Amino acid sequence: IILLIHCILLDTLRQLELKSSFSMQAKMPPCDFSPGKYESYPYERMLKIRKQNLSPSLVTYYKKPLLLHQGHMQWLFDYEGRRYLDLFAGVVTVSVGHCHPKVTATAQKQLGRLWHTTNLYMHPSIQEYVEKLAALLPNPLKVIYLTNSGSEANDLAMFMARLYTRNFDLICFRGGYHGGSPYTLGLTCIGSYKHGVASGFGCQSTMLPDVFRGPWGGSHCRDSLVQTIRKCSCSQGCCEANDQYIEQFKDTLSTCVPKAIAGFIAEPIQGVNGVIQYPKRFLKEAFQLVRDRGGVCIADEVQTGFGRTGSHFWGFQTHGVVPDIVTMAKGIGNGFPMAAVVTTPEIANSLAQNLHFNTFGGNPMACVVGAAVLDAIAEDGLQKNSKEVGTYMLLEFAKLRDKFEIIGDVRGKGLMIGIEMVKNKDSCEPLPAEEMSQIWEDCKDMGVLMGRGGIYNQTFRVKPPMCITKQDAAFAVEVFHAALMRHLERTAAS
């Protein structure tokens, strides 16, 4: 009994210490932009129309779904004029900022010139854009096929891999997300996206080398300033976890696929699954094993590309590899629907044996928007900003991990950060959905929008527009801190 009382007193003192070091009312940074007046339907009518006329598969975030009206750089405004700091960027899609002035002006100019013409004709913007994009990729990745979405891009990458190798089987990671089309669902290995129909023939998943939740890994394994709290016996330049996960990869090659395969696809950092990072050498060794089997290696840069990791422009560069095919979408157009597949001349030629056509891929609007996005990244120094502000956020969130028992892991690189929530650090069981949602709702009510991810929806995803400032980041951390304090109060009261 005395020991129990002692523990309760220590916990109470710890909570008081946390409260005394923190103001519960975080002050939102100033913004010199004023949104226009909302002039569309009332909120209740909007909600009714959504329920009646939009597919029920289109779920909404939050108990009271947000009705957003306008955006400006890192900020969003709802129909009542309330301002939110956007830490989710339209599911990691708004790269340079909502309604970025340069991108907006470029799009408006093109709207008055030429919206669309078949890409069977030449128009200036497609040639100008692909030259600019190709210059950002290493040799021999110089041939570009433009599409409209990440799912389309990964569909085409799968198709190219099979055509080129004349093999069929593809390997992917469990926990990976590569699209929701019937073809790509075979590569998407998150149960909530699966449907009870046949899809994705010839796709074989392998163990995810997750150094936090997986069977191996610890405090020296991943390419991040913040490592797991779980210890490991690895030494400098030698990762035992990597060796174990590579053995599992070899086992998949030996037991689940033919001797010759079409390829392997991976996100350099898993996005939807909650910013999962692999051991540092894993992709390099896995790529070699795949090429030994006649397969090609595909890097899915839909979320990691365009400078978001800070240290490099492409996520695959952080692993010291050059893929055979790269797919990209989301941030490529800052919200405009466009995507691309980049590959070698040899692999691209396999698609030219017969006709393959995309009506809207590479249309004039998409190409000028894509070019303006590349200009904005360079001119605004957004890759550097991703590194500096992302490093600051990552380290600040790590401080909260050390204070709160329910934060199991903080990880990431640049402005791609995951905060995995647990019941406690000993068990690492995912925090119950109701408690996750309460913290999430509190952040929204204080003006910060965050994403959710992970197999158990247990990870907060922080992936803001890359124009976010250090002041904004400090506000976001402060709000998250306040939400965690409120969670402690609810837990104590119950």
Image (cartoon, grey):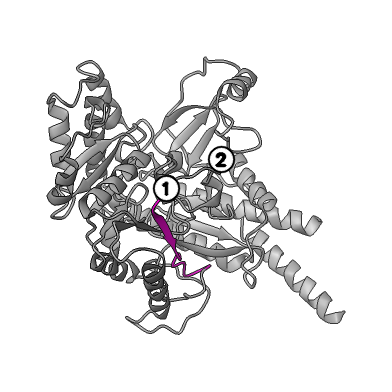
Q: Is residue 469 above or below residue 72?
A: below
Which one is in front, 16 or 114?
114
Residue 375 higher or lower than 240, as above or below: above
In the image, which residues are magenta?
201-213
Q: Position of residue 402 (x, y in %)?
A: 57, 68
Residue 280 location, x and y as percent? Answer: 35, 70
> Is residue 348 visible in the rendered structure shown here?
yes
Viewer-closest of 261 and 415 = 261
Image quarter (top left, top right, bottom left or bottom right) of the C terminus? bottom right
Nearest to viewer (mark 1 / mark 2): 1
**Residue bearing mark 1:** 200
Q: Which secondary structure, mark 2?
A: loop
Q: What amino acid does circle 1 point to? A: Gly
| Residue 372 percent coordinates (x, y) | 23, 34
Q: Do the residues labelled 1 and 2 touch (CB within 8 Å)?
A: no
**Residue 200: within the magenta?**
no
At x 26%, y 66%, the residue is 293
In this rendering, position of residue 79 left or right of residue 93? right
- What secondary structure predominates along the stretch shown in magenta? loop
Whole-number angstrom distance, CA of label 1 to CA of label 2:
40 Å
Q: Crowdedness of circle 1 by 10 Å Cα count: few (<14), some, many (20+)?
A: some
Look at 60% across and 32% down and name the residue there: 65
- Label 1 residue SS: loop
Residue in front for this viewpoint, 156 or 444: 156
Vertical side of 391 occupied by 449: above or below: above
Q: Which numbered disc flags the more N-terminal residue, 1 or 2?
A: 1
Q: For residue 23, say whether it is visible.
A: no
Residue 81 % position (x, y): 54, 26
Identify the residue position indicated by label 2 in the image: 447
